[in-house]
């Protein structure tokens, strides 16, 4: 732990002596749960925004949250002054003194605990950068991140998503990564730190957005069934392609999936990713076996390349390699189908998420859609929406249906086996891949 701390801190912190005025903080970009700040002071674990204008910052509940774990359950509240506050320059000098250490460069800070952290973190952080860099007032690039911090997640607990830290390490090899223990080391320094640029992500802060709900209970429900990315507008897929291509180069593979132009030179790749048996969302055992048989039959009947992936028995890197080449991906709700973010956004790229009768979530819809991949919700023997449905309609109705379908005790629904018509869903995959190649689908 000490070695990680030294990499994160000592290489990037410099002792400076402040002039009579303290460097003022600034909110470069602010959207609930996605905030880019400049010149943020930190002392004893409290973030201090120094400014004589309190109204220059959003309400602090849209930046950060207070998380607490009690008896294995995670609780969240709005932040207190012990977490984040705005102070004027006079107060800053009284609290901070005349010197501080500066964390140069950009710091990514994911303030979510393990229960709400997933492999979409890097996608979310980079989407925040995309927003920042396309506003003319603040077009200075603050990439790559110098350090990436997870102050709510211990590196000693089980169940941390493999890609949470692996993805940013692969995309930004020179960046340091730190967890809860490393954050405590910052606190134990006992002296102020200035974070030059801070990209703060907080899912609970996003759930408080008026775009999601004005009801506190519904906001909490959104943490389970929604994605923080829902507050963004969908944009052309090209914004993410560069990062996807960087990942492919890092893994030294040809990531161009079949796009329908030439069925003789490159075959379409169909991938079914699962974790079965498991306490989470899984298919009924018989349906699961039938789906595997029907998918494997496509190798001989249609010449497709088929991958059946047990998420428990494959390495993170191998999983990403297959996803980069996949044309159609199938999976149940959870982290498995999220691998669709690495698929090539072509006309025929499609992620099919298989839902039970009494559960619907928009989480992966927004994650996968942000990466430019079409997402299809499937129940039983048919899709819930056709892929030709205009995006504006599917987004609004999907979220409305998700909220209506989720009563209290959501997690219990995912413990029940999911039934799927294996014949119907495989036939749909074939018809999707064999559709008229001259017909262009609506761009996402």
Image (cartoon, rainbow, N blue to C red):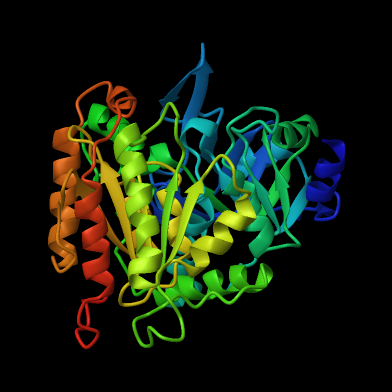
Q: How many marks?
A: 0
- Which residue extends farthest front? 300
- Percent across and percent down for residue 43 are 69, 36
Q: Is residue 140 left or right of residue 285?
A: right
Report whether 104 appears left or right of 325.
right
Residue 312: x %, y % from top left: 56, 39
Residue 208 visible within the image: no
Image coords of residue 54 (percent x, y): 44, 46
Residue 116 in sight here = yes
Is residue 299 depicted above or below 196 in this figure?
below
With 427 as the anchor, is 25 left or right in this view?
right
Q: Nearer the viewer, residue 207 or 358?
A: 358
Residue found 66% across the figure and 67% down from its top: 251
Residue at the image position 73 percent from the left and 62 percent from the top = 173
Q: In the image shown, does 5 or 164 lie closer to the viewer?
A: 164
Q: Please indicate whether residue 225 sits to the left or right of residue 155 in the image.
A: left
**Viewer-side residue, 213 vs 243:** 243
To which quarter of the image does residue 333 belong?
A: top left
Percent across and percent down for residue 319 are 56, 55
Specify the quadrant of the image occupied by residue 236: bottom left
**229 up-or-down from 6: above or below:** below
The quarter of the rendered structure image containing the N terminus is: top right
Give the vertical position of 435 relative to 28 (above or below).
below
């Amino acid at each position: 732990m000490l070695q990680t701390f030294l990499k994160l801190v000592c290489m990037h912190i410099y002792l400076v002596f402040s002039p009579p005025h303290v460097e003022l903080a600034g909110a470069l970009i602010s959207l609930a749960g996605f905030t880019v700040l400049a010149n943020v002071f930190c002392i004893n674990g409290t973030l201090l925004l120094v400014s004589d204008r309190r109204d220059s910052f959003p309400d602090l509940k849209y930046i950060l949250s207070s998380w607490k774990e009690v008896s294995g359950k995670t609780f969240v509240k709005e932040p207190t002054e012990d977490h984040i506050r705005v102070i004027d320059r006079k107060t800053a000098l009284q609290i901070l003194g005349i010197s501080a250490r500066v964390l140069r460069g950009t710091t990514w800070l994911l303030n979510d605990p393990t229960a709400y952290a997933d492999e979409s973190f890097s996608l979310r952080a980079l989407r925040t950068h995309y927003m920042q860099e396309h506003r003319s007032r603040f077009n200075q690039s603050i990439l790559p991140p110098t350090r990436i911090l997870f102050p709510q997640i211990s590196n000693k607990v089980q169940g941390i998503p493999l890609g949470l830290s692996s993805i940013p390490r692969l995309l930004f090899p020179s960046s340091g990564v730190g967890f809860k223990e490393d954050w405590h080391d910052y606190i134990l320094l006992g002296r102020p730190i200035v974070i030059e640029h801070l990209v703060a992500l907080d899912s609970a802060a996003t759930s408080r957005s008026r775009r999601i709900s004005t009801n506190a209970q519904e906001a909490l429900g959104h943490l389970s069934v929604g994605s923080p990315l829902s507050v963004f507008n969908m944009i052309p897929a090209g914004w993410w392609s560069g990062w996807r291509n960087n990942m492919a180069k890092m893994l030294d593979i040809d990531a161009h999936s079949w796009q329908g132009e030439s069925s003789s030179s490159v075959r379409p790749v169909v991938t079914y990713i699962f974790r079965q048996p498991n306490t989470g969302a899984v298919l009924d055992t018989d349906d699961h076996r039938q789906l595997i048989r029907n998918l494997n039959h496509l190798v001989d009947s249609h010449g497709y390349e088929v991958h059946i992936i047990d998420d428990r028995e494959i390495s993170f890197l191998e999983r990403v390699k297959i996803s980069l080449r996949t044309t159609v991906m199938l999976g149940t709700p959870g982290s498995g189908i999220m691998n669709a973010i690495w698929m090539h956004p072509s006309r025929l790229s499609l992620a099919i998420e298989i839902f039970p009768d009494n559960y619907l979530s928009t989480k992966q819809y927004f994650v996968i859609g942000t990466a430019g991949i079409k997402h299809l919700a499937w129940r039983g023997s048919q899709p819930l929406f056709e892929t030709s449905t205009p995006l504006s309609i599917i987004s609004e109705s999907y979220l409305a249906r998700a909220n209506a379908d989720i009563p209290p005790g959501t997690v219990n629904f995912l413990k029940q086996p999911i039934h799927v018509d294996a014949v119907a869903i495989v036939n749909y995959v074939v018809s999707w891949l064999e559709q008229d190649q001259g017909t262009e689908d609506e761009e996402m």
